[in-house]
Image (cartoon, grey):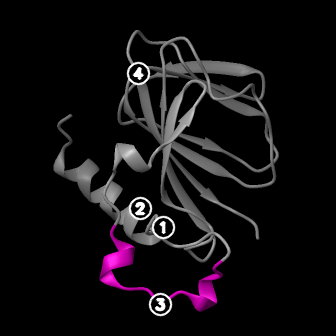
Amino acid sequence: MKLSTTIKVAIVTLMTQTIHSQEVKKETTPTEIKYTIENCVNHFDLEKATKTKVGYQYWFGDKNFTQENTLKMSIVEPGKSTHAPHHHVEEEFFYILEGTAQFYLDGKTTTAGPNTSFYCPSNMEHGISNVGKTDLKYLVIKKDLK
């Protein structure tokens, strides 16, 4: 996959703000973590990804490492979605890297491809599904409440 310089800079910026090391234990709180260059840079590793029923997900940053933000990459097989439309207190951003997504927000849908973002306000019903013929790869950026 080739990404433009602008997209690379945007992804690196997002990752720099929310990145973590997969080795950090879940029970560790942010005040106990010593942040270093070694644990603040996280390269995608399929072997460390979590298999889901529709593909897999990889946490570049989670709330147990960052102060409150998460950055996750999800890969969803054609014709599937990670879950039904839902809502929660936290707002979310989705950023499409590859494939064709159908976004659902408050009763309406739209379809979009790579280099598209989708914002989900707090407590608004939303969802994302793969309506393409190839895997859908997207980032989810979220501020988690602790």
Circle 3 is placed at which residue position?
A: 34
Q: In the image, which residues are magenta?
A: 28-41
Q: Position of residue 78 (x, y in %)?
A: 48, 14
Disc 2 versus disc 3: nearer the observer: 3
How packed mark 2 is, by other alpha carbons closer than 10 Å (few <14, some 14-19, many 20 or more), is some
Q: Earlier in the sequence, mark 1 or mark 3?
A: 1
Which one is closest to the eye, mark 1 or mark 3? 3
Estimate how packed mark 1 is, as few (under 14), some (14 to 19) or many (20 or more) residues with alpha carbons within 10 Å.
many
The amino acid type, in three-letter code, at marker 1 is Thr
The image quadrant that residue 85 belongs to is top right
Disc 2 marks which amino acid? Leu
Residue 48 is labelled as: none
Picture quarter containing residue 129?
Answer: top right
Q: CA distance from mark 1 to mark 4?
A: 25 Å
For marks 4 and 3, the one nearer the N-term is 3
Q: Secondary structure at mark 4?
A: loop
| Residue at the disc numbered 2 | 14
Q: Amino acid at mark 3?
A: Lys
Dot 2 or dot 3: first in sequence order is 2
> Which residue matches tag 4?
135
Circles 4 and 2, Cβ within 8 Å, touching? The answer is no
Of the image marks 1 and 4, the number of the one nearer the N terminus: 1
| N-term-proximal mark, 4 vs 2 | 2
Image coordinates for residue 10, horizontal then vertical, percent: 33, 56
Which residue: 31% across, 81% down?
A: 37
Vertical comparison of 111 with 9: above or below = above
Q: Is residue 5 above or below residue 41?
A: above
Q: What residue is disc 1 on?
A: 18
Question: Is 39 situated above or below 88?
Answer: below
